[in-house]
Image (cartoon, rainbow, N blue to C red):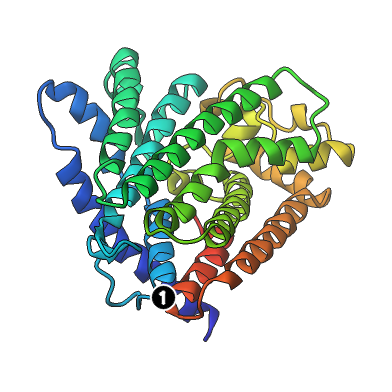
Amino acid sequence: MTTETTEARVLEAIRERRDLVNAAVDEELPVQPPERLYEASRYILEAGGKRLRPTVTTLAAEAVAGIDPMTADFREFTGLDGEPVDVLRAAVSIEVIQSFTLIHDDIMDEDDLRRGVPAVHEQYDTSTAILAGDTLYSKAFEILSETGADPADGLEAIRLLASTCTEICEGQSLDVSFESRSDIDPEEYLEMVELKTAVLYGAAAAMSAVLLGADDEVVDALYQYGIDSGRAFQIQDDVLDLTVPSDELGKQRGSDLVEGKETLITLHARQAGVDVNNLVDADTPAEVTEAEVDDAVAALEEAGSITYARETAEELTARSKEHLQVLPEGGSRSLLEDLADYLITRGY
């Protein structure tokens, strides 16, 4: 199968599941009084997004259940107790948590744009944005509590999502602390990325296995698949921030450099002797020019830093796919492998 054919297959799988998740969001998160709160809560969900994490959740369910991905009905999976499990609710809960983190991240980072539209705190106001994020956080657990899974499995799924949210906060705290440090090493960065980004991929991958009553070996393997794929995903995001045109990013290219955010790229460059702090001469992303970003990227490429980041992402992806060997061979496992590759080859 050619690379083009593989990517087309992955994109079709994502599109199909995105449509299902979007329809389920409409059902699970209707606009109701107070309307402004729920409109703000849905704002980022309606602004777009590939729904990658829910795709992982549903593909993992198909793989665990041994169901052909072309025939899966995500509200009709069967747990080990023989009762139906609504996997789509689990997928929605994962995406709702993702949106909650984006709203709060944008407030903390004072970012004006998200997915090419004004951030929630810009479109509404900061107080409403905070409440919208909090609402999404609580709604995610409400949605997840109604999958119909065996009570013990349902409780474990809720525990998994709760601990994931705690770890995301820990990762965000580490990220903030990095802003005042100059001695960060790549391993610390990867630890931060695991907590801030990858744990939600881990939860997305393991959630279905938990709800369907799979054994610990399968749950743990899927979780590690998500962790390694999620870390690779974030590294690719760091690369895209420098290499994708601003109009495609939905924000100013090179904004991480302007804001002084450490990435695997900048950490490698520092070790190679690059004066990262002076690669661009702007106080805000809006002030940086495309020419300045081009020059910065050239310096980072010359230092081998972008290549280093890409190679690290490739290594993590190869490792992520090894974890899937506990699953039966088939179309769903193959799609999970292809999705891992897509996460580090995608554009924005």
Identify which residue is drawn at 48% across, 47% down.
Answer: 203
Identify which residue is drawn at 65% across, 33% down.
Answer: 257
Q: Position of residue 36 (x, y in %)?
A: 17, 22
* Residue hosting label 1: 9
Q: Is residue 322 above or below residue 302?
A: below
Q: Is residue 112 above or below residue 93?
A: above
Q: Position of residue 235 (x, y in %)?
A: 64, 48
Horizontal arrangement in the rendering, residue 97 relative to residue 83 (left or right):
right
Question: In this rendering, does residue 164 appear at all?
Answer: yes
Query: Which residue is at the front of the view, 28 or 207?
Result: 207
Outermost bottom residue = 1
Q: Is residue 343 above or below residue 27?
A: below
Outermost top residue = 127
Q: Residues within 10 Å of mark 1 (few under 14, many from 20)?
A: some
Query: Which residue is at the front of the view, 182 or 135?
Result: 135
Horizontal arrangement in the rendering, residue 186 relative to residue 323 (left or right):
right
Question: Picture quarter containing residue 313?
Answer: bottom right
Q: Amino acid at mark 1?
A: Arg
Q: Position of residue 181 (x, y in %)?
A: 76, 20
SS assignment at label 1? helix
Outermost left residue = 33
Identify which residue is drawn at 51% across, 80% down.
Answer: 329
Question: In this rendering, does residue 115 appear at all?
Answer: no
Identify which residue is drawn at 37% across, 61% down.
Answer: 58
